[in-house]
Image (cartoon, grey):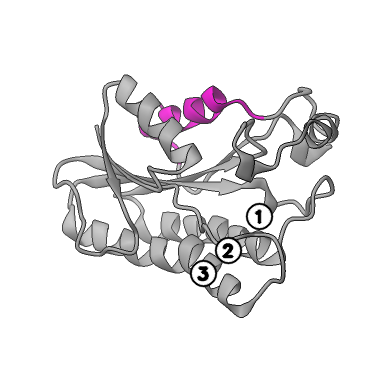
Amino acid sequence: MNIALTGAAGFIGKILRAELEKAGHKVYPCRTDDERFLPYTGEGCLIHCARHHENITGEITESKWQGEFETDVMLPYFYTMNMVRANPKLNNIIFISSIYGIKVPTVRLIPVNYQVCKAAEIQLSKILAVNLAPKIRVNTVILGGVLSDREVAEQTPEFRRAYETKTLLGHMVLPEEVAGAVKFLVSGESKGMTGASIVIDGGYTIC
């Protein structure tokens, strides 16, 4: 399968690229802010995994609102439509989103612009599922906190303990758990699904 992957250089993007290539897929890293880069013409899948990189701490400015909305909603929409027009055999689109688009957090203060834009991203995926059916199916993987030792993730031992106590499975999402859901949606085994959301969060959102 040919897979165009936005955000391939990010934390989740790197996990997905490695696991998808290991499974035999051809992955094309791409950017939603570059409309000229439409990487394949054969049958394939588009995965939206781009993340806004502006600092999430400090004052929530108009610039941060605009940057988050562009990354989560506007650019994915326009890039998707460009891909649909350029690649007639595109038949599968997957969004990677966050539980903070469906649940207000209680463990850590998450910026309001991030939460609102993730909610809009999830809604966008459902609208596209309707508008692009029956030729193209569109689904979303909604992730909880993914275990990471990156400094930017700020996952202190205290934070991890607090988060894990609010999950049913008692642990943060593991990288391999992220890849498993995406590989399922890429595969023909999910061909009966569109407009759906798969939540990978250890049960956090129902606690």
Residue visible at 49% across and 39% down in the picture: 11
Please give the label number shown on residue 67. Answer: 3
Please give the label number shown on residue 120. Answer: 2
Residue visible at 63% across and 40% down in the picture: 151
The residues tagged by marks 1 and 3 sit, at their Cα atoms, a distance apart of: 17 Å
The residue nearer to you, when weighing 82 against 146, is 146
Q: Which residues are magenta?
A: 173-193
Q: Looking at numbered disc 1 in the image, what kind of residue is underneath it?
A: Gly
> In terms of sequence position, does the residue under pointer 1 or pointer 3 come before the other?
3
Q: Position of residue 137 (x, y in %)?
A: 38, 46
Q: Position of residue 70 (x, y in %)?
A: 47, 69
Residue visible at 84% across and 37% down in the picture: 207
Q: Position of residue 56 (x, y in %)?
A: 65, 59
| Callouts 2 and 1 close, C-beta under 8 Å | yes
Q: Main secondary structure of the magenta part?
A: helix
* Quarter-of-image position of residue 197: top right
Q: Residue furthest bottom?
A: 62
> In terms of sequence position, does the residue under pointer 2 or pointer 3 come before the other?
3
Q: If the image is split into quadrants, where does the N terminus sit?
A: top left
Q: Is residue 33 above or below residue 160?
A: below
Q: Secondary structure at mark 1?
A: helix
> In terms of sequence position, does the residue under pointer 2 or pointer 1 come before the other?
1
Q: Residue furthest front?
A: 151
Q: Is residue 114 left or right of residue 30?
A: right
Please give the label number shown on residue 101. Answer: 1
